[in-house]
Image (cartoon, helix red, strand yellow):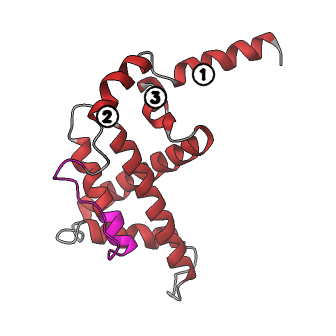
Amino acid sequence: MSQTKLSEVIRTGDLLVRDDAVSFLRDQLLLWTGMWDPSDLRAPSSEDSIADHFVKISHSISVLEGRTHIDLRMLLHRILQYQYYVRIVDEIEKSRIQKQPGVGAATYAIEFLLQRLYPNDWGLVEKKERRKQLLHRQNRLGKRLTRLSGYFGLGFLLLASQEAMGRM
């Protein structure tokens, strides 16, 4: 590898890890009480369907988004949300649902999940497109986080810099 490429790799690595990693770990890990600690986060149970898991994870994400800082739980919830989404798409692909030509399983999955997330007002057209776009953005972020944690390990989520997360 050339010196130029090597220095570019080192600079990129420096941007990935937060500047205060050591002090952050010292301060924050002692406070870690698990993914479902706050009482307003609803943990999925083994009796829940995949769609129920998705809905509970999505609810937890909206609660965590209301907080002033991004914490590890938010990132882990994003990964779980994406994994449940992928499982639902797979189930729809394997099912015998009559699909319209040119409409994929992902479209059916989005519609199904949004109906579950917003059962009371899913029919309101003005909110429908905005919510679809939001779910697509969440899925893209979940996919990126899943891939990054696959390459770097889940510890990446803990030590990733805000700049790296912002650029994603």
> Which residue type carries mark 3?
Leu
Classify 10 Å Cα crowding around label 2: few (below 14), some (14-19), many (20 and above): few
Using the image, tell me which numbered label, if any, was put on residue 70: 2
Callout 2 secondary element: loop
User: Picture coordinates of residue 10 (x, y %)?
Assistant: 65, 16
Mark 3 or 1 closer to N-term? 1
Q: Residue furthest front?
A: 30
Q: CA distance from mark 3 to mark 1?
A: 12 Å
Classify 10 Å Cα crowding around label 3: few (below 14), some (14-19), many (20 and above): some
Task: Examine the structure image and report whether residue 39 is included in the region drawn in magenta.
Answer: yes
In this orientation, does residue 136 appear? no
> Which residue type carries mark 1?
Gly
Using the image, tell me which numbered label, if any, was put on residue 65: none
- The residue labelled by disc 1 is 13
**What is the span of residues highlighted in magenta in the rendered image?**
37-55
- The residue labelled by disc 3 is 159
Image height of 142 relative to 6, above or below: below
Q: CA distance from mark 2 to mark 1?
A: 21 Å
User: Picture coordinates of residue 109 (x, y %)?
Assistant: 44, 70
Residue at (41, 26) in percent of width and height: 162
Callout 1 secondary element: helix
